[in-house]
Image (tube, helix red, strand yellow):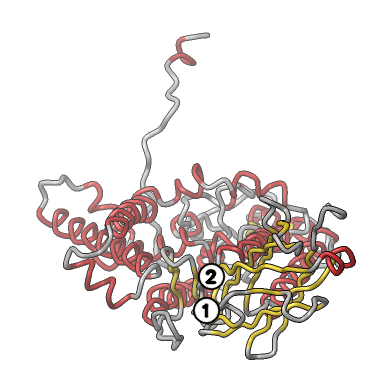
């Protein structure tokens, strides 16, 4: 190994990416998504929702009570199957979007992208446009202007990070009370630990690491290439049009008009580098498809702005598929969904979503389990009668207090003994264990092998659960 290889650095100093602001359709779409996302995230804990026996909050994860309120739906730990289906749907949607439109999820919907956009907006508001930020970056820390502007920026970063973390914590308790308890020192320790951890992680992810999260930390950028096809629509640079025979060239005298450039053999790219300056991850889209590209479309806005100013046709940088881009006669870009991979993911999403809604809508208002007490399996009484014992567990998930009746089908009158629990009242989200016994005389015990427990509520909902009766003859 020579000295040059031995002296090669494994790591490089981070060059800060300071994107230039741009106007355009994709930038407007990203702004709209940012506003909607922030409104949903920060306002949902304060949305009231009337419900009995629980705080009036639309979204509330009651960890101590082991129940999770989602508007009118109450989810319990035993409904974890719903979470499994939801995670499958989320993964399928991600793969579906990637196969259809590349990393569009990263560019528009990812939390990292949305919060980084918000932090960059704060940075722009305090420090100015890209040239001003670059000048401020090169100034020494002894400069008063840098201290005030950068210090104000960092303070706003901390406040937004804290607000983000605090809002997350408010989902786990009644927001007005939890917020008051937090600032008076009466909140649980978990609230303070979670808020601190999320404040630090949000600040680091959106305020410091930024594009490095997408490039080095997030695994999605690494395995996305396995989901790309030649028909996948993503951001591309039209090299044939931009370079032509002699490559790209700046718009100097005699090289400004569209016809002059075509006649001279130069491409439409005037090498303004605006597509690089607006990129939030600092790449040059003209170097081809790169795994670090998050398909945000800002370079498309930038290039279209320059094309409009120069009087050239739009679309030098555009969303397109590799197949269409390299064809002899490209057509207008379109989403090619008629592919086996895309159709397969789409069908999976539809089927699993339909099943999830079906399962939620057909969930019973209560859950029950009946277990036979096997120690001993049966008891021979002094008068010769045989007794079996059972343990019945009822859980009320109806959303209100409910009264349940328990009976047996297939048993003689008076054989079932529930003590004082033939009718039992259970509060929402609570469980009750009832001890039941069945006693039969020897003749009937020999004939009795199976019977049914019947559990019903006031709404007329019935659950029938088969049970066995054991004797010395049918163990």
**For residue 196, which quarter of the picture?**
bottom left
**Which type of secondary structure does the marked residue at label 2 adopt?**
strand
Q: Which residue is mark 2?
A: 431
User: Of all residues shown, which one is farthest toward the bottom?
Assistant: 459
Q: Is residue 468 above or below residue 408?
A: above
Q: Is residue 198 left or right of residue 254?
A: left
Q: Is residue 210 left or right of residue 163?
A: right
**Which type of secondary structure does the marked residue at label 1 adopt?**
strand
Q: What residue appears at the point 66 percent right and 74 percent down from the top-left corner?
A: 417
Q: What residue appears at the point 22 percent right and 69 percent down from the top-left corner?
A: 181
Of residues 52 and 137, the one nearer the viewer is: 52
Residue 254 place in picture, x, y as percent = 54, 61
Residue neighbourhood size for the residue with mark 1, other residues' Cα within 10 Å, grouped as few (<14), some (14–19), many (≥20) = some
Q: Is residue 229 above or below residue 63?
A: above
Of residues 302 and 454, the one nearer the viewer is: 454
Q: Is residue 106 above or below residue 216?
A: below
Report if residue 105 is visible in the image.
Answer: yes
Residue 101 place in picture, x, y as percent = 68, 63
Of residues 409 and 62, the one nearer the viewer is: 409
Q: Earlier along the polypeptide chain: callout 2 or callout 1?
A: 1
Q: Determine which of the numbered discs, if any, sits on residue 145 in the image.
A: none
- Marks 2 & 1, CB-CB < 8 Å contact: yes
Q: Which residue is mark 1?
A: 426
Report if residue 336 is visible in the image.
Answer: no
Residue 427 place in picture, x, y as percent = 49, 79
Q: CA distance from mark 2 to mark 1?
A: 7 Å
User: Of all residues shown, which one is farthest toward the right?
Assistant: 447
């Amino acid at each position: 190994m020579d000295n040059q290889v031995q002296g090669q650095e494994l790591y490089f100093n981070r060059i800060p990416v300071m994107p230039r602001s741009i106007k355009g359709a994709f930038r407007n779409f990203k702004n709209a998504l940012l506003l909607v996302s922030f409104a949903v995230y920060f306002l949902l804990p304060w949305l009231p929702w009337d419900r009995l026996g629980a705080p009036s909050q639309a979204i509330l994860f009651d960890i101590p009570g082991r129940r999770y309120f989602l508007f009118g739906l109450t989810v319990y730990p035993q409904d974890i199957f719903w979470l499994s289906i939801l995670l499958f749907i989320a993964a399928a949607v991600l793969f579906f979007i990637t196969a259809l439109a590349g990393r569009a999820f990263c560019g528009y919907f990812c939390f990292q992208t949305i919060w980084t956009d918000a932090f960059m907006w704060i940075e722009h508001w305090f420090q100015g446009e890209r040239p001003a930020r670059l000048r401020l970056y090169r100034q020494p820390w002894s400069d008063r202007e840098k201290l005030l502007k950068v210090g104000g920026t960092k303070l706003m970063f901390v406040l937004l990070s804290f607000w983000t973390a605090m809002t997350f914590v408010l989902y786990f308790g009644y927001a007005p009370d939890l917020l008051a308890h937090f600032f008076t020192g009466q909140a649980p320790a978990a609230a303070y630990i979670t808020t601190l951890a999320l404040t630090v992680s949000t600040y680091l992810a959106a305020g410091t690491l930024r594009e490095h999260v997408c490039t080095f930390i997030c695994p999605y950028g690494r395995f996305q290439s396995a989901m790309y096809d030649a028909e996948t629509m993503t951001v591309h640079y039209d090299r044939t049009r931009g370079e032509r025979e002699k490559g790209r060239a700046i718009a100097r005298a005699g090289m400004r008009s569209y016809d002059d450039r075509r006649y001279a053999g130069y491409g439409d790219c005037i090498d303004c580098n605006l597509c690089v300056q607006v990129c939030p991850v600092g790449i040059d889209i003209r170097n081809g498809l790169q795994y670090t590209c998050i398909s945000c479309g800002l370079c498309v806005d930038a290039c279209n702005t320059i094309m409009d100013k120069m009087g050239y046709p739009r679309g030098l940088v555009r969303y397109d598929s590799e197949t269409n881009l390299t064809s002899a006669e490209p057509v207008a870009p379109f989403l090619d969904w008629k592919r086996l991979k895309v159709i397969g993911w789409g069908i999976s999403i539809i089927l699993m979503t339909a099943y999830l809604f079906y399962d939620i809508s057909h969930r019973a208002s209560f859950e029950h389990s009946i277990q036979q007490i096997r120690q001993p399996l049966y008891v021979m009484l002094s008068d010769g009668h045989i007794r079996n014992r059972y343990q019945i567990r009822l859980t009320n998930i109806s959303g209100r207090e409910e009264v349940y009746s328990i009976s047996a089908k297939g048993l003689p009158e008076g054989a079932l003994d529930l003590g004082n629990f033939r009718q039992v009242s259970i509060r929402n989200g609570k469980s009750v264990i009832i001890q039941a016994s069945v006693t039969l005389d020897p003749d009937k015990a020999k004939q009795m092998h199976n019977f049914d427990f019947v559990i019903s509520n006031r709404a007329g909902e019935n659950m029938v659960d088969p049970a066995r009766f054991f004797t010395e003859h049918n163990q």
